[in-house]
Amino acid sequence: MALGVSPTGRRVVVCQDGRILSSDETGHGPARLILKLDASRVAPITLAFSVPDGRRAVLGLASGGAVVIDLVEGRVVRTFERDSGALFDVALAGDRLALSDGRNKVYVLEVSTGALISQLNARRARVSWLDGGRRLRVVGRSVEDWSLPATPPWPHLHPGKAGVAALSLSPDGLHAASAHGDGRVRVWRLDRPAAVAEFLLHWSVVKDLEFSPDGRTIAIVCAQASHLFFIDLSGPPRLRSIPAHAGRRLAWLAGDLLLLATYRAGDRSGMLAWRHGQAEATPFDTGNISIYDMETDVDRKTATLRTSDGRVSRFHAATGRISDPFDAASSNGIAGHPARMALIHESELEIREANGSSRSVRLPGGFATDVAISPDGRWVAVGHIDGTVSIWSSVGLERRAVLRGHIGRVAAVAFDPSGDWLVSGSWDGDLRTWSMRSLEETPQALLEQARSAWGQSIEDVLDARTGSPD
């Protein structure tokens, strides 16, 4: 059972067996039933009213989750599912929720979106909001008052379920679409942690997907579906399809030219093209050669192709012709840029310049799985089978960073149009967003950012890991 008293001291709310009971504001008369929750899922251990109005209440659960309730409308505003040990204390102010858990963490969340605003370290701490929610008081071994960001930071984790097979970023850099092994596609706003739309397309794996040049449509192909699917984003997301062939890869180029590399070859159906939304596709005769990989280049004027005869070439949107083939029999991933191409081999990164010269470097840390070039051509990102992403200078081929976070094979990497962010998708089901601007920061600036975000210094972290006394 959990019990709370409103800020005015004139209303009492009790949660027992999932029933939310409330006295009226006069403090007299029988309690009334506001809402009934699923008792099998709700084990409340603490309750707090929102300040300063007392219109909402938050129930802290034994599971570590929380339920925010509108006491006037009698409805659940948002449920937070967490597996972080029984909550020690909760506090609510407007759209900000503070959760103090059993693992010595305090989480500050935005109720309307579920986004994480900040995470603090405090052992068995009491929490309360000051100044109407502008500051948070944390009372543990000491008393600390925190001024927190007005809005959630750009989230770095977008949790999914089934493994990611491919991803695409919108031209405005605000949205991402991810293809999953269970036949689903998820659409994300990159400034929010949760997917804004999800569609189950087919029972087979979604092989590839691509945003249109105007960002209003996503094209999707599945491994064994005889249709090409589209998600229309001009209004509420909706799904449609047209007849096609099962395929491997998509590219959507300038002039609204959509290309599909199919599993078929030898019957003029190895590659299909739709221009300006026409209903029927134009087949390109690829002979007996299959297109194993096809990637939209940064400027969308060309697509880079890797074919079954071990060659890499470019398809030109303006002419509809394939040019500049060269042998690259051992490559297993490609990325194109007007100035250069990037190719990955099992444990090697190759940079091929527009003049045909080539340089390569050995990749430490595991088999390479995907590659991307930043819009300005400076950086190359390589995904690895061990879950890491490595960042390389395209000119000097120096490794600048190793990004760790995924616990499964990295299936896709993509830069946003500004080049400030890199998004990776993994077989662990998650998308992760990485700041490329951090590569330009000094070590001192990065340490200060970490201290601000964590609420503790690097020395505090090292002391905690080595068991040093406080």
Image: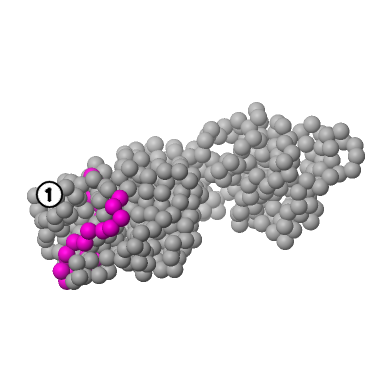
Query: Quadrant location of residue 90?
Result: top right
Q: Which residue is mark 1?
A: 354
Farthest top residue in view: 131
Q: Disc 1 marks which amino acid?
A: Ala
Instruction: Answer left or right for 282 relative to 84.
Output: left
Residue at the location (11% across, 61% down)? 326
Residue 302: % across, % down: 20, 50
Residue 367: % across, % down: 30, 65
Residue at the location (37% across, 48% down)? 217
Q: Nearer the viewer, residue 142 or 388?
A: 388
- Whether residue 286 appears in magenta in the rendering, the answer is yes
Residue 276: % across, % down: 27, 48
Can you see residue 192? Answer: yes
Numbered range of the magenta stretch: 277-299
Q: Nearer the viewer, residue 274 or 15?
A: 274
Q: Nearer the viewer, residue 422 or 288?
A: 288
Quarter of the figure that contains the C terminus? top right
Instruction: Answer left or right for 317 relative to 81.
Output: left
- Whether residue 269 appears in magenta in the rendering, the answer is no
Instruction: Answer left or right for 85 relative to 192.
Output: right
* Residue 296 against residue 326 in the figure, above or below: above
Can you see residue 404? Answer: no
Residue 81: % across, % down: 61, 54
Per the picture, the main secondary structure of the magenta-coloured stretch is loop
* Residue 218 against residue 205 in the figure, above or below: above
Query: Quadrant location of residue 128?
Result: top right
Total labels: the figure holds 1
Residue at the location (66% across, 57% down)? 63
Residue at the location (44% across, 37% down)? 448
